[in-house]
Every structure is written in structure tokens, then in C-alpha cells.
Amino acid sequence: MSDEAPPPGIDARIPNPARMYNYFLGGKDNFAVDREAAERVLKVAPEAPALARRNRAFLRRAVRYLVAEAGIRQFVDIGTGLPTEGSVHEVAHELDPGVRVAYVDNDPVVLAHSRALLSGTASTTVTVQGDVRRPEEIMANPELRSLIDLSAPVAILLVAVLHFLPDDDKPAELVARLRESVAPGSYLVLSHVTDEERARDAREGAAVYRQASSGVTLRSRERIRELFDGFRLIEPGLVPLDDWRPDDENPLARQARRHLPTWFLCGVGHAS
Ligand SMILES: C[S@@+](CC[C@H](N)C(=O)[O-])C[C@H]1O[C@@H](n2cnc3c(N)ncnc32)[C@H](O)[C@@H]1O
């Protein structure tokens, strides 16, 4: 992305969490201001890029599980972000090219990027503007509804998104409202930052986001578990990123990953 001429409607003067995340993932969809803020996070949390990659790996494993083992054929990915590779539809289409994915985000950079990326997959993907703080609007969006059948089970993805909402937004209520809009048998895939380990560093890293377009709210394990109210957490429950159904059984690689602090918890819930 050019630092000189940001697209219309896009503010390149304020750090943006989606673009900082893209920088952590080694992507090019970020501006100087995002890279500077990301470098400040790296000073207190040098593990941030590794955690961003682990978060994407969790997302991929969850999508594969849902398609291959749970029979899910439609996904609503809220807070799509600017992934560098392995978007939800790419992972799902390796297993079934008919899987349908609606990408939802409130950030114009993400929407523009997502639309450009998806131009060749119009029969199975759609990108819509939406804010998780207005769940009914997301689910009523006509473009989303043209692809996603809400009378059949859906997987709602809220991966690394809800920590951008302060408590005043009542994230657990928002998730409950999303659950009420989908059919029984639907799933929730969620990851969220926590300060249960190395709390001071986690808080200093989160503080950098206060100067960005969205702040970060760290939540305890209990508060994150509450986000799954109304869902049954499937095995192995609410766990650090690498522990959710790992597909890499190489013991040395797994041991190396254990050095990462538990700054993310993740899980998959089933609404029966
Ligand atoms: C860290 S990225 C996560 C991307 C992706 N889900 C992942 O885990 O790789 C967070 C994304 O959430 C989006 N986001 C933040 N607040 C949001 C809101 N209120 N409604 C919709 N999307 C939001 C941001 O624009 C950004 O794209």
C-alpha cells in the first residue's frame, strides 16, 4: 500500500489495528504510522508476530474442522482483517469448493482489500460492510443473505475481534444476539487477547492501541468464557492458540511454541 497516496476515505495518519496486524503478519497493506505503532508494541511484546501467525493457524484449523468434521458449509467471518494468506474461503475450498463465506468488517481498507482479493469467487464469497456492534444489521444485509441461508447452520467467526470492543459495548450480549439470528447447530469460532500471563507486558502492548483507531480491552479467561454463553464449548475447550486441536505432532516444534506467553485464548462453541 502506498504511503504517499492512501485511497479516498482512508486515514493514514492514525494507526489502524487491522493494518498493524497485517504488518505483524509480514504483509504490505499498511502505512508508516501503522508500522511505527506496531514497532512500539514489539518493544514490549516481541512475540506479537508469532502470536498473529498462531492466531491465523488456529483459524485455519477451526475452519478445516468445521468443514471436514462438523459438516458446516457457510461462514460469516466478522472482523475479516487483512490476512496475508489462507483466507477462510481458501482453506474451506480445499475441502469443498462449494462452501460459502461472507466477509464482514467495518474498516474501509479491509473492505477494499477483500473485494479486490475475492473478485474471482463471486459465486461463493461476498464482502459486506458491517459493525459487530450492530449484529442484526449484519445478518439482515441483503448481499449477505443472497449467499448465506440463515435457516441452515452457519459458523460465525469472531477471531481476534472482540478485544477491540470496550466493556461498555457489552460484547457477550452482542454474541448472544448473533446466536439468536442463526439456526440451531451453528458454531462460534472465537479468539481474544488476555492478560492472564505477563500481565504488565500485555497491558503495555494494549496501551499502544489507545492511540490507534480502536483500543484493546484485555479480558480474563472467565470473561472470555462468558462470550460463549449459550454455546457448548467443544473439546478441548477454551485454550491457548496452539492447544486447539494441533495438527502438528512434531514434539520439538510444539515445545518451541510453549515459550510464547498465553496472550490469546481461543475456542469453538456449538449452539444446539
Ligand atoms: C486483528 S484483525 C483480525 C483479523 C482476522 N479475524 C484474524 O483473526 O486474522 C481485527 C479485525 O477486526 C475488525 N474490527 C474491529 N472492530 C470491528 C467492529 N466493531 N466491527 C467489525 N469489524 C471490526 C478490524 O477492522 C480488523 O479487520
Image (cartoon, grey):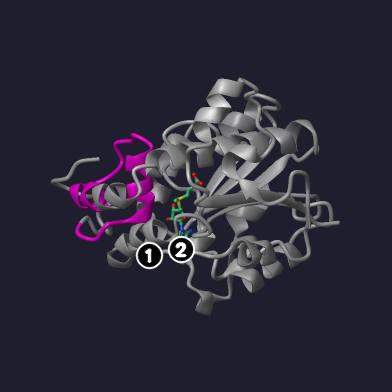
Asked whether mark 2 lies closer than 8 Å to ligand 1, one says yes
Distance, label 2 to label 1, CA atoms, is 6 Å
Q: Amino acid at mark 1?
A: Ser
Q: Answer with mark 2 or mark 1, whichever residue precedes in sequence.
A: 2
Look at the picture and state if 109 lies above or below 90: below
| Residue designated by label 1 | 214
The one of 212 and 153 positioned closer to us in this rendering? 212
x then y, percent, for residue 245:
69, 35
Q: Is residue 25 magenta?
A: yes
Give the left or right position of residue 146, taking residue 200 as reference.
right
Asked whether mark 1 lies closer than 8 Å to ligand 1, one says yes
Q: Which residue is drawn at the image coordinates 70% and 31% (left, top)?
A: 98
Q: Are marks 2 and 1 in contact (CB under 8 Å)?
A: yes
The one of 237 and 5 positioned closer to us in this rendering? 237
| Residue designated by label 2 | 164
The answer to whether any part of residue 243 appears in the image is: yes
Tag 2, which secondary structure? helix
Say few, some or many: other residues with alpha carbon within 10 Å of mark 1 (under 14 / 14 to 19 / 20 or more). some
Quadrant location of the C terminus? bottom right
x then y, percent, for residue 8:
25, 55
Q: Which residue is drawn at the image coordinates 44% and 35% (left, top)?
A: 117
The answer to whether any part of residue 156 appears in the image is: no
The one of 265 and 214 positioned closer to us in this rendering? 265
Q: Amino acid at mark 2?
A: Phe
Tag 1, which secondary structure? loop
